[in-house]
Image (tube, rainbow, N blue to C red):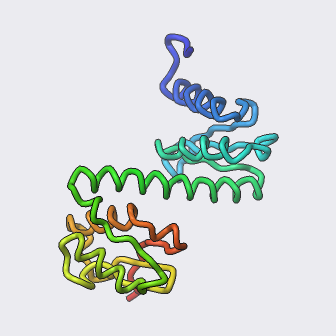
């Protein structure tokens, strides 16, 4: 319970400490400070925290969904946390994409990738067609394990949102295939 008359910053810190405690991180292993460069707070976990199990790390990772910036002082603990956080973000993106596509009646017929029967470029074409797009209009294979958005794609279009949800809901990550954006070449 936060006492009456507490500032917004104090309330924020109390909430963060409470949420981290629910994940198994003791408040005395947490430092919270405002970072001018980020224009936000950063949360650093130190001390005995590297002994957190996978479930506790996943709990901490879910707190980042709300916009928290969390890191571990111990390098190996931070690397383990980043890996768990990346998996949690991917699972959350897939879950959100499934809901989004279901609401639009686009999930049921979503094609699945099968590396034994087809290549990534053929799958990308099928996915675009499923979304009502022309083959090769949005997606491009950058490497055998990376599907990207074409550099000349309209990044403001609804089609980009649609295809991004379709890729997130697909089974590509189950086969070690990443989806991402590549920056434009320097002029």
Q: Which residue is at 52% across, 73% downward?
A: 175
Q: Which residue is at 61% across, 27% downward?
A: 18
Drawn side of residue 179 relative to residue 139, left or right: right
Placement of the C terminus among the 4 image quadrants? bottom left
* Residue in front for this viewpoint, 106 or 76: 106
Is residue 138 placed above or below 99 in the rendered structure?
A: below
* Residue in front for this viewpoint, 180 or 135: 135
Q: Which residue is at 40% across, 63% downward?
A: 168
* Residue in front for this viewpoint, 164 or 74: 164
* Residue in front for this viewpoint, 157 or 172: 172
Q: Which residue is at 37% across, 51% downward?
A: 96
Count of numbered marks = 0
Drawn side of residue 180 relative to residue 131, left or right: right
Residue sticking out furthest to the front? 117
Placement of the N terminus among the 4 image quadrants? top right
Residue 67 location (% of width, % of height): 48, 45
Is residue 164 placed above or below 75 in the rendered structure?
A: below
Is residue 100 placed above or below 22 in the rendered structure?
A: below
Residue sticking out furthest to the top? 4
Residue 135 occupies quadrant = bottom left
Residue 171 location (% of width, % of height): 44, 67
Residue sticking out furthest to the bottom? 187
Residue 23 location (% of width, % of height): 64, 35
Is residue 135 placed above or below 18 in the rendered structure?
A: below
Drawn side of residue 26 relative to residue 133, left or right: right
Residue 184 location (% of width, % of height): 38, 82
């Amino acid at each position: 319970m936060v006492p009456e008359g507490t500032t917004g910053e104090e309330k924020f810190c109390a909430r963060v400490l409470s949420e981290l405690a629910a994940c198994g991180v003791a408040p005395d292993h947490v430092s919270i400070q405002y970072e001018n460069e980020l224009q936000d707070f950063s949360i650093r976990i130190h001390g005995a925290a590297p002994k957190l199990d996978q479930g506790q790390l996943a709990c901490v990772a879910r707190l980042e969904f709300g916009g928290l910036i969390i890191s571990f002082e111990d390098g190996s603990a931070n690397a383990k946390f980043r890996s768990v956080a990346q998996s949690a973000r991917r699972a959350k993106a897939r879950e959100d994409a499934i809901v989004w596509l279901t609401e639009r009646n686009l999930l049921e017929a979503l094609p699945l990738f099968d590396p034994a029967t087809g290549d990534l470029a053929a799958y990308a074409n099928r996915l675009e067609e499923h979304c009502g797009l022309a083959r090769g209009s949005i997606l491009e294979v950058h490497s055998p394990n990376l599907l990207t958005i074409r550099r000349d794609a309209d990044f403001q279009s609804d089609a980009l949102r649609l295809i991004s949800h379709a890729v997130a809901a697909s089974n590509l990550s189950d086969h070690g295939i990443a989806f991402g954006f590549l920056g434009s070449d320097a002029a």
